[in-house]
Image (tube, coloured by chain):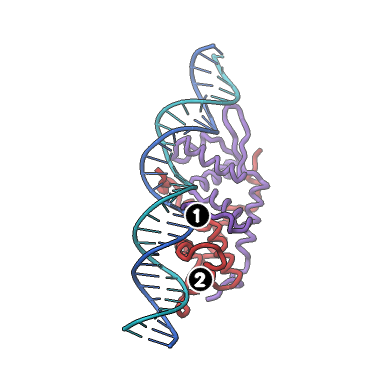
Chain colours: A purple, B red, C blue, D cyan
Amino acid sequence: MGLTKSDIFTQEQNELSTILKALAHPARIAILQHIIKLKACICNDLVEELGLAQATISQHLKELKGIGVIKGSIEGTSICYCIDEVVWNNIKSLLNDFFIDDVRKINCC
Amino acid sequence: MGLTKSDIFTQEQNELSTILKALAHPARIAILQHIIKLKACICNDLVEELGLAQATISQHLKELKGIGVIKGSIEGTSICYCIDEVVWNNIKSLLNDFFIDDVRKINCC
DNA sequence: AACATATATCGTAATATTGCAATAAAACAA
DNA sequence: TTGTTTTATTGCAATATTACGATATATGTT
């Protein structure tokens, strides 16, 4: 198989796992950290910063764009990527809802 | 290829992405939600609750055990799974550190 | 126009993940 | 012991992911 059965899960479960999946790669974590640190970022910076090929970086950026957490604006010949505030806050909310505060309420053994 | 180049990333980046990867599947989200809801959970419950084969559930449980977020205790012939409080809080901290509060500080365009 | 620079896309190879049937293992019951 | 129940493991097929070279596209420069 290799095909996730999305139809048997709730929309919330699918949405959350899609977001987590998009974030679940060290290169994509590194890209987000770099964008946050510099408050902006062009693709070529990342190629130099991380040790990955330009095609690979572009592919990771595409996945992050896929969940909308970053957006790019044309800046001459390069593209300036930055965090999308609304999506970022939405992800934070989803995670906060999932990781509810009082862990004692969920523990059993 | 298909092999993530873990050696070029920081320990923090690898750790965070490993955790996110383990959580990044709707079945595993559903399993955690079920455990939290019932405050405990035996494997066979999940087979009935979700529409997946027993072998598949067992495999997902293994991945969650892999990051330590759940632990199982033998209860007769079944196994009672529950959240590991320490690991749960650790994941929350890691995510809180990553999703820093003031998004205005990281926005640029 | 011709060239340079920056990013995206395509094609491909290697590896990982998902899902399940079949089977094994472990604990209890008769 | 034999059978029953519950969970884990194995083996396999289908699909997804990761990475990169080659190439395409898009914009700016001369």
Marker disc for residue B44: 2
**Most foreground residue, B42 or A6:** A6
Query: Does mark 2 fall on the same chain as mark 1?
Result: yes
Report whether residue B105 is seen: yes
Query: Badge 1, how many Cα within 10 Å: few under 14, some, many 20+?
Result: many
Give the residue drawn at x 66%, y 38%.
B109
State the SS at label 2.
Answer: helix
> Can you give x and y, in whole percent of width and height, for residue C20 in the image?
46, 60
Residue drawn at point x = 56 percent, y = 57 percent: B26
Is residue B85 among what the camera can see?
no
Q: Residue at x 52, y 46 (%)?
A: A28
User: Looking at the picture, which amino acid does disc 1 mark?
Assistant: Lys
Q: CA distance from mark 1 to mark 2?
A: 24 Å
State the image coordinates of residue B17 (x, y, percent, origin top left). Answer: 49, 53
**Could you say where residue A64 lies in the image, as x and y percent from the top left?**
57, 44
User: In the image, is A78 to the left or to the right of B62?
Assistant: right
Residue B21 is marked as 1
Asked if residue B70 lies left or right of residue A70, the reply is left
**Which chain letter matches label 1?**
B
Above-or-below relation of A20 to B89: above
Q: Total label count?
A: 2
Q: Quadrant of residue B92?
A: bottom right
Looking at the rendered image, the disc whose residue lies closer to the viewer, 1 or 2, is 2
Q: Crowdedness of circle 2 by 10 Å Cα count: few (<14), some, many (20+)? A: some
Q: Quadrant of the N terminus of chain B?
A: top left
